[in-house]
Amino acid sequence: MNLQLKNKNALVCGSTQGIGKATAILLAAEGANITLLARNEEKLQSVLAELPNSDQKHNYLVADFSKPEELKRVLETSSLQFHILVNNTGGPAGGPIFNAEIGEFERAFTQHLKCNHILVQTVAPFMKTKCFGRVINVISTSVKQPLDGLGVSNTIRGAVASWSKTMANELGEFGITVNNVLPGATNTERLNEIIKNKAKKIGLPIEKVAEIMMNASPAKRFAKPEEIANAIVFLASEKASYINGINVPVDGGRTKSL
């Protein structure tokens, strides 16, 4: 299938590792020009060198999502314009919601919702002129089914999903779609950290905790980052023009709701 991404410009956030990196590589393989966005310049340069390139223009921007005003300045000083935006950043620390400090909610709200909003406000005017835009937010299956031990994450992910649906309703008439991809347990550094913390808390070996988590999915395994990226890239394409305002679980069937 030709996804018709040649000459499309894509801004991929959190693209130095995991799902973000896999998405950037797959978008580039489909012909898109990629701009990586993350806070570690050395890692950005490393990923940049890995991107497939067939007369494409790839580059990167450095910004820290804990500092929304810095992100805004970086975007404003860049002359880059984008057809595709992939909102993706690392999730909040785990733990029971009752024990969460107020600051944890504030930090997560800033990194996930405030920064997503700044990014969409920045890229949408150009998308409107082209009557084409794709915004894909990488969230979590907790949007449909809250996950134990991820209280702050569950709360903020739900807020982002509601923000996204509202944005989809407002931008749809301009040929801009806004959708959410909800990864299940995916083989990333964040998942490894969650497994380690859970193993320490309940006193089981890391391997046993990983086995229990894998068995929670009918697929009996963790997703590969590329499997999440495949869904993102399709939603970014011309072929997904009438898919708007939805949550797409990519979790091997783990989520119990329809």
Image (tube, helix red, strand yellow):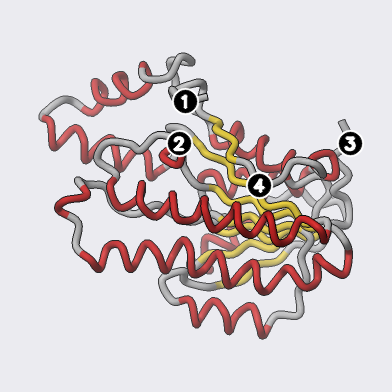
Decide which of 138, 191 is in the foreground and name it.
138
Q: Which residue is mark 4?
A: 245
The disc, 1 or 3, on the residue closer to the chain's N-terminal end is 3
Dot 4: element: loop
- Residue 74 visible in the current orientation: yes
Q: Is residue 188 above or below residue 10?
A: above
Q: Residues within 10 Å of mark 1 (few under 14, many from 20)?
A: few
Dot 2: element: loop
Q: Residues within 10 Å of mark 2 (few under 14, many from 20)?
A: some
Q: Residue 84, image x and y in percent?
A: 74, 57
Query: Residue drawn 89% across and 36% down?
Result: 2
Query: Residue drawn 23% across and 66% down?
Result: 102
| Circle 1/circle 3 CB separation < 8 Å | no
- Give left or right: position of 235 versus 221: right
| Circle 1/circle 2 CB separation < 8 Å | yes
Gap in angstroms between the C-alphas marked 4 and 3 = 23 Å
The residue mark sitting in front, 4 or 3, is: 4
Decide which of 198, 49 is in the foreground and name it.
198
Decide which of 121, 194 is in the foreground and name it.
121
- Residue 50 visible in the current orientation: no
The disc, 4 or 3, on the residue closer to the chain's N-terminal end is 3
Q: Quadrant of residue 150?
A: top left
Q: Residues within 10 Å of mark 3 (few under 14, many from 20)?
A: few
Q: Quadrant of residue 244?
A: top right
Gap in angstroms between the C-alphas marked 1 and 4 = 18 Å
The residue mark sitting in front, 2 or 3, is: 2
Q: Which residue is mark 1?
A: 257
Q: Which residue is mark 3?
A: 2
